[in-house]
Amino acid sequence: GENVEQHPSTLSVQEGDSAVIKCTYSDSASNYFPWYKQELGKGPQLIIDIRSNVGEKKDQRIAVTLNKTAKHFSLHITETQPEDSAVYFCAASRKPASGTYKYIFGTGTRLKVLA
Amino acid sequence: DTAVSQTPKYLVTQMGNDKSIKCEQNLGHDTMYWYKQDSKKFLKIMFSYNNKELIINETVPNRFSPKSPDKAHLNLHINSLELGDSAVYFCASSQDRTARGYFGAGTRLSVL
């Protein structure tokens, strides 16, 4: 069945360093890949997304890369700050001919930025 | 204004009871979802509705019954609650054109 693997499960970095989270998806028809940040006691918040016709997208300190051939996509956070500490989820999705987008989520990465 | 709002935020109840969670979105989106997040933080889709029509129904026990009175609301009713139903339930909505999903703050359900 459809599956998204996410690594690492936990990541600790020093403030100012970069953090990279990697995901691999199984459904080759997936064409939309969002990343979510979930802070304690809150709902997941969309932070960046990428579509299958693009290889890279950047928004300030956050960037996402997509390798469709290898079915890999990654989140890069540069100059990390303590407020970046949270659980990050990747997801892969596609929309069937008659239906709605269905997200398959990765298992999450707990990022801790040490001051 | 909160884009996707769900109530209650916390729900503590006894096994065997029936409970409901309500969700409303003011984003004008066509599609709404219910997700379950277990104790290991794993997020899994349960249902999706598009313009009040059920589109996705993952292998969820039929004790769970979603209801969408209009495209801005999607409620979740759970009958005969079991210990294993304890989790955080998230409502979300998205617009078909962009696929971007927006989540509510979650309802933490504890079944005792």
Image: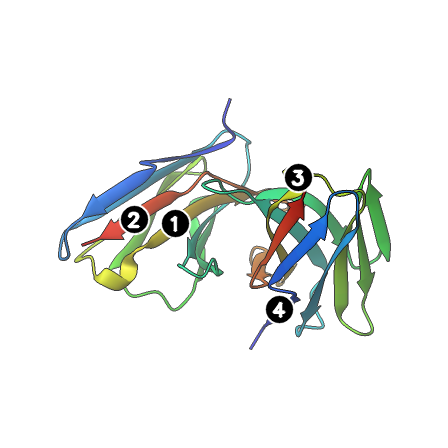
Q: Chain of mark 1?
A: B
A38 horizontally vs A41: left or right: right
Q: Residues within 10 Å of mark 4 (few under 14, many from 20)?
A: some
**Residue at which label 4 appears:** A4
Q: Pointer 4 and pointer 1: residues touching (CB < 8 Å)?
A: no
Residue B97 visible in image: no
Whether labels 2 and 3 share one chain? no
Q: Chain of mark 3?
A: A
**Residue at which label 2 appears:** B109
Relative image position of residue B67 (x, y in whole percent): 33, 46
Relative image position of residue B61 (x, y in whole percent): 29, 66
Amino acid type, callout 3: Pro
**Residue at which label 1 appears:** B89
Q: Pointer 1 and pointer 2: residues touching (CB < 8 Å)?
A: yes
Q: Chain of mark 2?
A: B
**Alpha carbon distance from label 2 to label 3:** 30 Å
For numbered disc 3, what is the local secondary structure? Answer: helix
Query: Residue A58 lies in what quarter of the image?
Result: top right
Amino acid type, callout 4: Val
Looking at the picture, does residue B2 appear above or below residue B112?
above
**Alpha carbon distance from label 1 to label 3:** 27 Å
Residue found at x 68% / y 40%? A115
Q: Which mark is residue B45?
A: none
Q: Nearer the viewer, mark 2 or mark 3?
A: 3
Relative image position of residue A110 (x, y in whole percent): 59, 55
- Of label 3 and label 4, which has the lower sequence position? 4
Relative image position of residue A104 (x, y in whole percent): 57, 63
For numbered disc 2, what is the local secondary structure? Answer: strand
Which of B4 and A5 lies nearest the eye of the viewer? A5
For numbered disc 4, what is the local secondary structure? Answer: strand
Amino acid type, callout 1: Tyr
Amino acid type, callout 2: Leu
